Structures are given as C-alpha cells and as structure tokens.
Amino acid sequence: MFSGRLLPVFLACLLQALACHGQDSLLIQGIRYRTDTIIHTHDVGLGTLHTYYRLPDLPLLVNTLVLDARNPYLRFETCLGKDSLIGLERPSAMALRNSRTGHQAFAAINGDFYNTVSPNQGVPVNGQMLAGEVAKAPHASRPVIAFDGGNNPFIDIMTFRGSVARAGKQIALNGVNEARDADEMILFNRHFGKVTRTNKWGTEAVLSLLSGSWGVNWVLQFKVDKIIAGVGSALIPSGKAVLSGHGKAAAFLNELYAGDTLQMEVQVGLKNDPFLAPLLTEMVGGDRQILKDGIVLDNNWVELHPRTAAGFSGDGSKVILAVVDGRSDYSKGVSTKQLADIMKASGAASALNLDGGGSSVMVVRNQVKNSPSDGSERAVGNALLMVSTAIPGTEKTMQLNAEHVTIPFGKKFLVKGSTFDEAGEVIRYLTAENVTYAVHGNIGKIDQSGVFTASGTGGSGFITGTWKGMTDTLTVALKPVRQISFFVKSLVIDDRRDYTFKVFGTDMDGNKYLIDNDIIQFSVLDGSIGSVDANGIFRGLKDGRVAVAIKTADGEHTDTCHVDVEIGRGNLLLDDFSDPGSWSYTTSYIDKVTLSRQVHPDFQAEMMRVDYEFTYSNRTASITLNKNIDVYGMPDSVLMEATGNGRKASFYYFLDHPNGLCVVPAFTGTSLQGYKAAVNTAGIAQEDYPLLFKSIRLIVEKDPSYVAGQKYSGTFWLKGVYAVYPAKDPQNSLSRPVTPPACSVFPNPVKGGFYLQTDGAVTGPVRMRLYTLGGQLVMDEYIEIGPGGVSDYIPVVKIPPGAYLFVVSGDSGSLKGKLIVLP
C-alpha cells in the first residue's frame, strides 16, 4: 500500500525497474522454463498469498498458496467428506459448511487418496486426525502431513500405539475405527458412523470424556456410561466414544461398571524422530514425501498427472500448498519430481504428494482457482482446510488482485480490489467499492469497472487502484503481437444473419490467441455490398464480393478477409436431371438400377427416369444418386420435383456437412409434386458455408403388400432439385464470383510496401503494373519472383491511399489481383 504523497517517487523508481525487467523462469529437473501470464502476491487474507502462473513451454498451469503459520488467527484443519470416514464431498462444500463467524474456512485443497468402491467409498488410505481425535490410524509405510496446536507442521511416516488402563491394569489399544479381530481392543468414535458394526462375540463400553478435549500423546480420562456384552453393533452416541473388545480385551471390559473411570493414551509418533512426541491436532495422508530438507527425493512417479502437494519452509513458519493442472492441452501435468521442484521454488523445504488426477483442486474464498481435469470439482474423501479465527472488523486497507500480469496485446484483464481489516482478514474479497483505476505507460486502457485492455505499444507499465487515499499498484508487461489474422480468410453470408469476425493475434513465440475486437479497426472496401461496425459485426447488403480489412491502431499489422454476399431468392435450380450420365449411384438391397431421360407418359415433360428391381427381404431398400453441386448462399430447405413409386417411399437430401441431412417423410402415390425438406441451418456455422449438394437417396420403404423373397420393380421420375430461400422473388440462376487467381498480396491492406505470393506457376523476372479502379496506370515496374513464388519487397510509399488492381506478366504466365493501400 502506498500513500498519495509517496506514490510519484515510487512510480518513478518502478518505471526504471521495469525497463530492465527480464523474463521470469523456473528451474524444474535441471531445465529452466520461462513463466508467462504471472499473477502473484495476491493476498487472500491473513497474509496468505495466492499465486497463479503458466509455464508455456511444458505447458503447465500452477496455483500455489503460501501461508504464514505464525499468524495467530490462522488454523490448519482437516475435514472428512460428510464428516464420516465413509462418504464423498467436494472440498469447496467442506469449506463452506465449516465456515461461520470466527471460524472462516477461506481456503481448501483435496487431501489423501481414498477408497473408491462401496461399501467403503471415501475411506482415506492413510491416517487422519481432526481436532486431536484420531479418525483413522496412520498407515505403516505412507507419510502424512500433521500440525500441532501451535501450527507447527510435520511430514513423516507416523507410528501408532495406544493403551487403556484402570486400577493398575492396562491393555493395548489396537486400533481406531476399524474391524475388530481376535483379542483386540478397538476405539470407535463419531467419525465411524452411528454404530460400531461389530459382531456379538465381544463386549463394548460407552465412554464420556471427563474433561478437556481429545488429543494424542497425553493421558485422557473417561467415565464409563454403559457396558454392553454379547450384543455387538453398539450405538455411538453423539459426543461419546465406544471401546469394543474381544477375548482378552472383552474380559478387561467385563470387569468395568457404569460410573467407573479409566485412562486412555493414543500415541502417534514420528518414525524418523521417535523421541519427539508433539501434541498433534490435525493429520492428513499422502503417498510419498517428495522433498526433504530442500532435497528432491528419488522416488519419482514419472507419469504426468494433475498433482496436489502440501509442505512447509525450513523453519516451519510458512506452509506451502500447490495444485498443478494436467491431462489437457493447456497443462500436461507433472511427475512428482517436477512437483517437488515447483514446491521448492515456492519456498518449501519439505513436501508431501497428496491425491492427484481429477481430485486435484484448490479453493480460495469459495472460488475454485484451478481447472480440475474432470471438468468440474470432484467429491473426495477428505480435505485440508485453512481457517481464519479472526472476527471481521472494519475496512482499513485495500489491495489489488495481482502484483504483476504479463498479458498479450489485445487481451483483457479484470482488475479487482479486496479490502482488509486491521488483523489482515478479508472484508470484501475482490469486491472493493469506490476504487479509482489509472494506467501508467503506453500499455492500454482501463475503465472504472476495472476492465484493462492491452491495446498499447509499450513494453511495460503499471495500473494503480486508489481507495480512500490509499493506492496499490499492479505492474504490467505487454507482450507484443507479431501479426493479426482473421479466423477465416473467406466467408459466405446473406442478408439474414449478422456475423462477428474473430481476430487472432500471434505473439513473438508463435502462440495464437483470440484478440478482443474493440481494439481492432475494421473497414470494408465497398460499403454497398456489406457493412462492418467497430465491433467487427458484418452485415450483407447486396449480392457481390467485398474485402473486409483489419488493422491495429498504429497501422503496423493488417489482414483481409473476402466476403461473398449471396442473397438467395425463391427457388434456385441446382440440377434439372437432363444428363443422367452425370449422376453416379450406389444401392442398398436393390438388385438393378437404370437411369434414363424420357418423357413422362402422363405429365408430358422430360424427366430422369429411375427404374429399379429388388428382392424383398423385410429390409428398407434404397438408391443413392451422387453428384457434387455448388449451393449458392444459405438456403433454408431443399425441394425436389418428382413422382413417387406408387408405394410407400421417402427422400433424403444430403449436403456436405455433418448436419446436412434433409428428410422428406414417408409418402405414397405417383403424382408429380415438390417434395420439400428443411435444412438444419441452426446446426451449420457461418464459417461452414458455402455448402455442397452431395446426393439424393430414394428410399423404398417397407410395405405390407411386399412378400419376402418375391421380386418387385418400380420407377421414380425426377424433374428438378432446388435450393429454397426465405426471400420469395424468383430467380433462375446465380453464380458465385470466380475464385481469384493463385496470387495474393501480403500484408493486404498495404502500408509502405508488400510482397506478392504466387502458387509457383509464375516465377522469375516479371512486369507488375498497378491501376486505379478507373483504369489509370500509377505504377509500372519489373520485379523478381523467386522459385518459391514470393517476390522481392515492393514499396508503395508514393501511392495514394485507395483500392488498386495489379497485373503481373512474365514469360511463364500472367496473374491479376486487387490490393488496398492504407494512409
């Protein structure tokens, strides 16, 4: 935070630092990878820093949390799905239901691996402890992360043992919330469920904790409420526990009476430091320690997956959590050694690998910060919660949602502010009101709702947010664009649909990304054919071809898209079937087909006659007639003038598109009429036009009069097939403009100069003449086109802005084209 009077001095120093700021990077398994789109040091409460960054070369998306374990208001707690060993729940839901005033679960990550099969679905593989109460004893060979009451963290394989004593007699406690075997004593508590699920061959004692709270590594005092012998499946009352014994353990319990007191000690120790007995309160398991004393351990899980890790700094003052996305094109996932390096780079000296894959999730302030590989947050067995015990106060300070962003030209970033009280607890998370934003440096613009658009040309700058006289700063590195380009190079449209152009930028590393249209300048060469507005929305006005041009504000980057406006009207003839030989055919359950051109005896009109023979086999038979026909514009249906075969039949029309099937329902009769079928225009994207008419299927439907095994014959008469358009004024034929010759200008529109690119048919020395649209010669030069079809650079600095025609001629041929010269 900065006061208003210190801000100018700070900003001057900041600009100088940014001028020499280099590319950030991260060392993973001996290879240094650059980081991109960095959003770091985002305080989410109590000094907890959320970091998001991208490693584009792998690629990876990483989210981390760094927490101050010494903050007096911070607690680490574990949670079971639905508060039971058996059960699944999303970590965000666990955090939400465990939040209340003075106990706000502001962040969460997924926890241990768990059983995925009923009836034990959700049971963690490793041990777990909640508020000093063991829910499941630790695994004998898998490590956990644990915390004591002072937030001191530990990672180790934990040992378990326990004892129960009364009046000088003592017996071993063999386990917690697990199946009871011969001569064993098992402790059951609220995490197991409502009953112990034991058989009748034993004795069970219901216990009440006399004072204090549950804990490990100290002696607890209990009162015996009830003794139940030879029954089994004792109820576990709320707030109480049950000791269940068999054999020798049952004999110990049989000597107890209601009202007796006994002592119990549950010991959970560190395998690698057995003389240390911390008063642990929370524990959640993983499958392997990946980082110890700053050393990456040689136990690599080599497959790349989404991963979750928990760890802490060398002195234990910082707890570090990381979630790495995986199983996608934008983030491949990591091995556990790579995960260890990410944890080390984030400040951890020790780290544990938790459950990963689709379970990996990081939740901050009720928002899922990563992108789970399942597509949404998964319900899991348990979670680690970060809890604030602070009672919210009044707003004292404000901080923006990032310290730094690296953003490509043309993208937007929403700047938000959070407010904090005197204890550092969040009062408004990313919803601070009355923040005034400003941009410093030629990096773009920001509106007062906080939407920053990277539309500038400068490499670095910063954004300030001022709230109640206090200012926070977000530094910005603007990635320059190498070129801009239309998503489509050509388009077919009519006057019924508007089309919003998509524009892509390509950065200096060759990465393509979508650019926001409001920072691109759009124009059309001929406004009578079509129009385009400032947001890149094109509307066709009349039939014709028009060039739509884009350029950046500085005019350095341009591109062109050719749009054919094709406004179909009425019924447009596609084919009159005058040449049966131009149609090929295939059959299904048809024995013989003959195509001919004849005069129909009843209607006295020439048509294509389709005669067929088939042997009925209780299957639908068909003849598919194939011919590729260009379709003008955007018809809403296809119509064929034809006769039926006198029996049940139907027609299918096929366009060259996955949604191009047009169906005429089954009919009977032999009359000549138009059989019309709708085109699924809603399922055809604008970019998919123009369409191609591919085939007609004449279907001989099953008919009750047919007898299996009998031979039948029939005839279809086809007069014409049409594309049908909503506009009703008739037309006979329209033609699409001829495709330009294989010669293009780039960039086009032109500013300062251009290159010619051909298909290689015209090479060597050629003469290039440039004419105005009125025919005036304005340029006549000889140029060289190389063997690859690309010319030397052709300057046009003295040519006035406007549209021009060019003619290129040489010994190997000639080409023509059009270009636009910008001011």
Image (tube, rainbow, N blue to C red):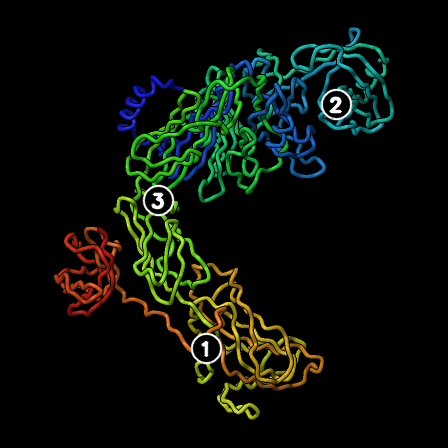
The answer to whether marks 3 and 1 mark residues whose Cβ atoms lie closer than 8 Å is: no
Asked whether 794 or 199 is in front, the reply is: 794
**Which element is circle 3 on?**
helix
Graded by Cα atoms within 10 Å as few (under 14), some (14 to 19) or many (20 or more), the crowding at tag 2 reads: many
Name the residue carrying label 3.
519
The percent coordinates of residue 41 (x first, y second) are: 43, 25
Give above or below for 359 relative to 590.
Answer: above
Q: Is residue 618 left or right of residue 469?
A: right
Q: Check disc 1 and give the amino acid type.
A: Leu
The percent coordinates of residue 156 (x first, y second) are: 55, 21
Asked whether 332 or 367 is in front, the reply is: 367
Give the distance between the C-alpha atoms of the residues marked 1 and 2, in whole angstroms.
Answer: 82 Å
Label disc, if present, on residue 573 of the rendered structure: 1
Q: Earlier in the sequence, mark 1 or mark 2?
A: 2
Give the distance between the C-alpha atoms of the residues marked 3 and 1, in whole angstroms.
Answer: 44 Å
Label disc, if present, on residue 555 of the rendered structure: none
The percent coordinates of residue 279 (x first, y second) are: 61, 13
Give above or below for 321 relative to 71.
Answer: below
For image coordinates 73% across by 13% down, the residue present is 264
Give the distance between the C-alpha atoms of the residues marked 2 and 3, in whole angstroms.
Answer: 65 Å
The answer to whether marks 2 and 3 mark residues whose Cβ atoms lie closer than 8 Å is: no
The percent coordinates of residue 63 (x first, y second) are: 47, 31
Q: Earlier in the sequence, mark 2 or mark 3?
A: 2
Q: Residue furthest top?
A: 168
Label disc, if present, on residue 188 of the rendered structure: 2
Q: Check disc 3 and give the amino acid type.
A: Ile
**In this view, the mark in front (2 or 3):** 3
Residue 173 visible? The answer is yes
For image coordinates 49% across by 37% down, the residue present is 325
Q: Is residue 2 left or right of residue 668?
A: left
**Which element is circle 2 on?**
strand
**Which element is circle 1 on?**
strand
